Image (spheres, rainbow, N blue to C red):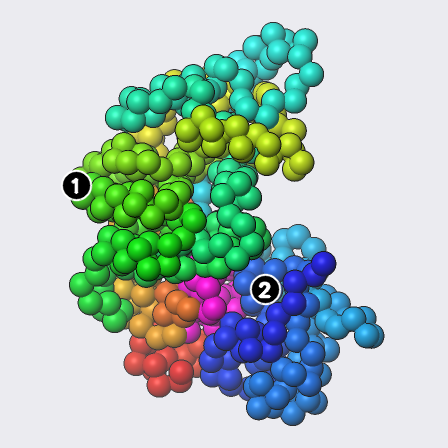
Amino acid sequence: MDATLSARALDTLLGDWRSSGGSAYRALADRIRLLVLDGRIPVGTRLPAERDLAERLGLSRTTVTAAYRELREQHLLHSVRGSGSVARLPGAPAVLPAPPAADYVDFSKAAPPALPWLADVAREAVDELPAHLGDPGFDPIGVPALRVAIADRYTARGLPTSPEQIMVTIGAQHAIALLSRALVGRGDRALIEAPTYPHAYEALRGSGARLVPVAVAPHDVGPEGFGPVDEADDLVRAIRHANPVAAYLMPDFQNPTGRSLSAEARERVLDAAARQGTVVVADETTAELDIDRAEHPLPLAAYGNAVMVGSVGKTVWGGIRVGWIRADRPLIRRLLAVRSPGDLGTPILEQLIVARLLGRMDDILELRREQLRAGREHLESLLADAFPGWHVPHVDGGIVTWVGLGAPVSSQLALAARTEGLIVAAGPRFGIDGAFERFLRLPICYPPEVTDAAVQALARAWGSLARTPVPDQSVLAAVV
């Protein structure tokens, strides 16, 4: 059954859509278009009836009808008489029309390019494949060699682990979805950070969770309205008051803010969770992408009871769909039961590739560290020149930075950037209910030529918002 978005909920997501100027129906259509393309209105969601939305927004029904018509013409809305209007995508990639000569730069996916020696390792793994061809090939738990390699990696990082505590999954997102189904029932509370990785809270919502957001300050707080923030205090308080069944956290180089929890904060949060019976799920997909962090805390489960999620999507390549869950054996057994209706296991060849790569993880991380350091410095330099009014945190690891724009225009900027050939994720993509319009997430892991093109497109988009060729902060502030 399709999800239905109420007029009130859509009003919240729309935010200050009227500030874009021009005709009301086009401004409304533009904002709904971005919400669909950005994933904040999932494909298949039924939009509110035209009359209901018009009443909620204080518009004439003619205005809403015209906006919906424009969305249908752009193949972003499908309407059937008597059944309402449902969000859709015109095809992949889901982008707005661009000038014929323009190539899109996709700056919305934060992932480095593949390892330079990945093809060689894959060929070595193919030579190993014949030893596995006598089996059916359906592997819901993981080949022994890979489970041993993952367990050994945790042990080397200071968290003793046995292979029996490991389940191999089809990437980290698959792991999060499995855990959501195993841990959360309809109506249960689940704690999340805000902002956070959007596909994680989508998985929790899909399992029927009521989300309890806890604010996360950027790694480098900056002039964005934050006072001193003790996230551990806020997390402990939320766990005690909301009594969530699960909590999804990114303790290291959080996506999108880049912050890391201290060792002391980890202990306090896990102690509070243990007292309440809350299962803490720690997403470690970026945990080892350290550039120059001063403190080096152990994996979260070294400080108390926590379920760990990892993958090679950010260290090796996103095209290698292998992740894992580290948990106690009883939970691993529950996950096996939850998994079987949805899939029958992780591909064997990809597991063999990853088993070989984990033995070279120190070399991989050294390469990524240098790439990320260079990417960070290059992006910071470009943004400082092009946007002196923006606040750009100096992150010490991870793959992104959470940029403060100084004005609540992130969705407008993302929409304007598409017309300049750039796809970028607006700040509200990482929150619930339309928050974080003052922020933009930008990756530090792209090659210099891609980053150059992205920042140039951003500068053109910023100038178009301010109606001046110069992206001057005071001018833009006056416009919005």
Q: Relative to residue 125, is residue 425 depicted above or below?
A: below
The quadrant the C terminus occupies is bottom left
Q: In the rendered view, does 166 fall on the left or right side of 365?
A: right
Residue 129 lies, with reference to residue 95, above or below; the image says above
Q: Position of residue 422 (x, y in %)?
A: 51, 59
Q: Quadrant of residue 270?
A: top left
Badge 1 amino acid = Ala
Residue 122 location (% of width, % of height): 54, 20
Q: Is residue 419 magenta?
A: yes
Residue at 61% in and 22% down: 139
Q: Residue at x 38, y 74 (%)?
A: 408
- Compared across the picture, whether 293 is left or right of 459 comes to left
Q: Separation of disc 1 and disc 2 at Cα? A: 39 Å
Any part of residue 252 in sight: no
Q: Residue at x 26, y 39 (%)?
A: 291
Nearer to the camera, 461 or 413: 413
**Stretch of the chain drawn in magenta:** 409-434
The residue indicated by pointer 2 is 41
Please state the horizontal and vertical placement of residue 195, each as a whole percent of the image.
38, 59
Residue receiving disc 1: 294
Depth order, front residue of 51/272 = 272
